[in-house]
Amino acid sequence: MATLEIRGLTVTVNVEDGTKEILRGVDLTVKSGETHAIMGPNGSGKSTLAYSIAGHPKYTITGGTVTLDGEDVLAMKVDERARAGLFLAMQYPVEVPGVTVSNFLRTAKTAIDGEAPKLRTWVKDVKGAMDALRMDPAFAERNVNEGFSGGEKKRHEILQMELLKPSIAILDETDSGLDVDALRIVSEGVNRAKENSDVGVLLITHYTRILRYIKPDFVHVFVDGRIVEEGGPELADRLEAEGYDRYLATQA
Ligand code: ADP
Ligand code: MG
Ligand code: MG
């Protein structure tokens, strides 16, 4: 049982003429087995929240706390966050030249578990996960994210999540750029991870489409660096019907 707790988080980025406040006091708790959807308009700071939790150096934490089972996440190095059980699928994943998917996964698994996985079960696990995500076996020998299509990047992220078994996974716009078939396959992967390892999921999205496949327990509306409304799945239905206008209108 894991608990990610975010309290009063404020974050700035450096811009040309100084700093810009992007997160303006975020409070959120995600526990094992729960799925939280964060939904909001473009530019509201959703990716900044994900990057800040992951420890991206571009973002400066100016206030608040992030803990995982009471441990101070913000004091951890990036690799320590992964070892502690956090997983982040980036909206814009980076290329890792010269490192194959197969080696990358095994290295990551070894780093996170503190020991190399047993070869026979590992090979079987990788093959099983790749089959389930309808990935060509040849994919394992390609370099990470090099020339990957949008759909391949997303599948690769979900493959990582299924194999690395984080306690809390943050998925940033996993639905963007996917056609309906790929979206379904990727969503099934997330749902398998939820069933098999009781992962807590923070699903960041602009569109309600993915929520037809991955059912959220909680929906948080994110506008201008803060959560402005919270509810259950019905809130996503209302956002689908009404969009974000009502929240933007009250800002003026
Ligand atoms: P979202 O993911 O909700 O679309 P982002 O977190 O990507 O929002 O961006 C929130 C705001 O912060 C935007 O106005 C964006 O331009 C700005 N921003 C984010 N990252 C940076 C950065 N590294 N440098 C400058 N501005 C940034
Ligand atoms: Mg965006
Ligand atoms: Mg974003």
Image (tube, grey):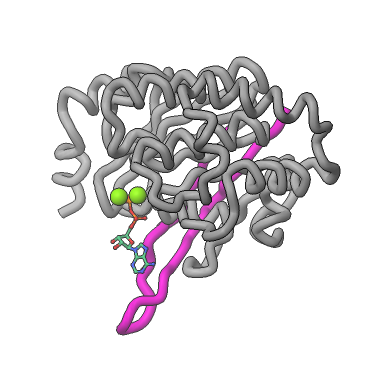
Report whether residue 54 is seen: yes
Residue 231: percent from left, percent from top: 39, 25
* In the image, farthest residue toward the bottom: 17
Residue 249 figure quarter:
top left
Asked whether 162 or 202 is in front, the reply is 162
Tell me if residue 240 comes above or below residue 160 in the rendering. Answer: above
Q: Residue at x 31, y 84 (%)?
A: 17
Q: Residue at x 73, y 27 (%)?
A: 1
Q: Is residue 88 magenta?
A: no
Residue 176 figure quarter:
top left
Answer with left or right where residue 45 lies relative to residue 33: left
Residue 76: percent from left, percent from top: 71, 59
Answer with left or right where residue 157 lies relative to residue 183: right
Report whether residue 33 is seen: no
Asked whether 205 or 185 is in front, the reply is 185
Residue stretch rendered in magenta on the structure:
1-30
Answer with left or right where residue 173 lies relative to residue 193: left
Q: Residue at x 25, y 44 (%)?
A: 41
Q: Is residue 22 magenta?
A: yes
Main SS, magenta residues: strand
Tell me if residue 106 comes above or below residue 54 in the rendering. Answer: above
Residue 96: percent from left, percent from top: 53, 57
Residue 106: percent from left, percent from top: 70, 42
